[in-house]
Amino acid sequence: MRALCIDDHPVNRRVLVALLATAGISADEAESGSHGLQLLDAFDYDLVFMDLRMPEMDGVEAAALIRARDDKKCDVPIILVTADIEFSVGPPRIGNDFDGAVFKPIRPDILFETIASALVLHDADMVSLN
């Protein structure tokens, strides 16, 4: 399984990549929404993790551009990753482009539950997330 982690803060990306590695998920990193879209053009991903607040292009705009694609990549599960307190009290209220949300600081149990739920939503092959 291969994931794409899009976040403008390198420490946040490294933490997420390390947590994913514990479940056998390899991950590429992008420091902006536009860089993430370039990587999505070049490679196939099973999951995308998208920070909400980024300069240049925020996560909402980048997710909408992924969903607007005219190829199979438009259906990749996208998980919101945010420290935004507005979204920590319930599910994201920012449209249907996200398949789940994980709040910073990331709790591994919540991360893996969210991944499993997103994969089920997209009828993806299940992996063991221990």
Image (cartoon, rainbow, N blue to C red):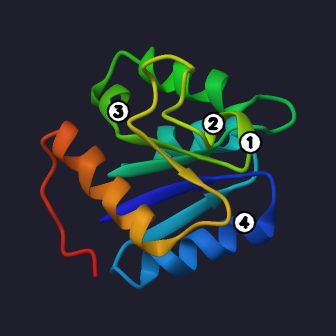
- Say what amino acid the circle numbered 3 marks: Lys
User: In front of the other: label 3 or label 2?
Assistant: 2
Q: Amino acid at mark 2?
A: Phe
Q: Earlier in the sequence, mark 4 or mark 2?
A: 4
The part of the image, by quadrant, that contains residue 98 is top left
Q: Quadrant of residue 54?
A: top right
Q: Which residue is mark 1?
A: 84
How far apart are labels 3 and 1 at the CA level? 27 Å
* Measured Cα–Cα span from mark 4 to mark 1: 14 Å
Give the number of marks: 4
Q: Are marks 4 and 3 in contact (CB under 8 Å)?
A: no
Compared across the picture, whether 89 is left or right of 19 comes to right
In this picture, is 17 found above or below 44? below
Mark sitting on residue 73 = 3
Q: Are marks 2 and 1 in contact (CB under 8 Å)?
A: yes
- In this rendering, position of residue 13 left or right of residue 25: right
Distance from Cα at disc 3 to Cα at disc 2: 26 Å
- The amino acid sitting under disc 1 is Asp
Residue 12 - label? 4
Residue drawn at 57 percent across, 20 percent down: 94
Which residue carries the number 2 mark? Answer: 87
> In this orientation, which residue lies closer to the viewer: 109 or 67?
109
At numbered mark 1, what does the secondary structure look like: helix, strand or loop?
A: loop
Which of labels 4 and 1 is toward the front?
A: 1
Point out the frontmost of discs 4 and 2: 2
Q: The residue tagged with tag 4: helix, strand or loop?
A: helix
Q: In terms of sequence position, does the residue under pointer 3 or pointer 1 come before the other? A: 3
Instruction: Give residue 128's mark.
Output: none
The residue lying at 87 percent from left, 36 percent from top is 55
Does 48 appear above or below 67? below
